[in-house]
Amino acid sequence: MSFTILAIMTLIALALVVASAFAHATWNYLAKSSRDTHAFTWAFTSVSTLVYVPIAVIVAWRDPPPLGALSFILVTVALHLAYFWLLNASYARADLSIVYPVARGTGVMLIPVGAVALLGERISPAGAVSILVIVLGVLSLHSRGRGRDAIQELIHSIQEPGSQLAILTGVIIASYSLWDKNALSHLSPILLDTGIFAGQALVNAPYYLCWRRQAVLREITERPIAVLAAGILSPLAYLLVLTALTFSRVAYIAPTREIGIVVGTLLGARTLKEPYLANRLVGSSLIVVGIFGLALSP
């Protein structure tokens, strides 16, 4: 494949992932703003099921997936169940602008290593430098204060329970990103994406309908637009990433997706009144530089 065609495909993938980042940051903000993040998550995954299953049925009818595709969906459902539980537990203990950068940043650092080790992908020197710039930006977003105090606060914040859970969330992010890249060889993005959310809604249904029904009803009645928006945006965000993964490298796509960190932290600073905006603006600039570097890397 010529350099020109590769560059065009990479830029198309970049556009999809940037759109995904905005959708992803928005639904995370909606979840963090909810009264009960666990109940809110089940409510919006149920909405996702109602919205996307009919589309997936039509796609499967026209192009039936192989029987073995079900095993890929089951594994990714299990990984995403762990992801949403850890993410919600993190949001219950820490700010949006702490959990989001740590969780996504951990995934950024682990995914390229896993892509090289498990999928046989190769990272060019320019791509490696760009990924490091993004990681530096993530750390800057997470820092507090300036100079030595910023480093001490960074170490302290990583040791807090919310950050520890966010780090575990990042490990799951890296795991499902690598698994789903492989799964796309066997089924389409819409079937994989719909299976993830429908599977979560079904597995969690007995618990939330029997023991947490009032909490779910409260989220739906008090914030119906937020539940509907998250139900549409969350699968859409991942569907755009999965589509990009069908013709681009996971080691580049996954880090580029982290532009959502900029959106998420600005939402936290402006609407949730979270502090250290200057640090986060520096981190945002570094992430943008890294993203353009990835887009132009061969």
Image (spheres, helix red, strand yellow):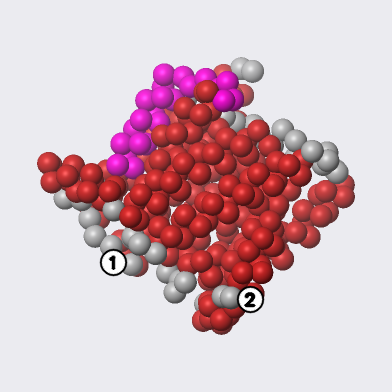
Q: Main secondary structure of the magenta part?
A: helix
Quadrant assignment, res 263:
bottom left
Depicted 56 relative to depicted 44: above or below = above
The total of numbered circles placed on residues is 2
Q: Residues within 10 Å of mark 1 (few under 14, many from 20)?
A: few
Decide which of tag 2 and tag 1 comes sooner along the chain: 2
The amino acid sitting under disc 1 is Lys
Q: In the rendered view of the protein, which quadrant contains the N terminus?
A: top right
Q: Is residue 47 visible?
A: no
Q: Is residue 178 magenta?
A: no
The disc placed on residue 58 is: none
Say what secondary structure mark 1 lies in.
Answer: loop
Q: Position of residue 13 (x, y in %)?
A: 57, 37
Left or right placement of residue 26 versus residue 154 in this view? right
Residue 255 percent location from the top left of the image: 46, 37
Residue 231 screen position, x and y as percent:
60, 64
Residue 14 placement, left or right of 199: left
Magenta range is 118-139
**Residue to which mark 2 is pinned:** 210
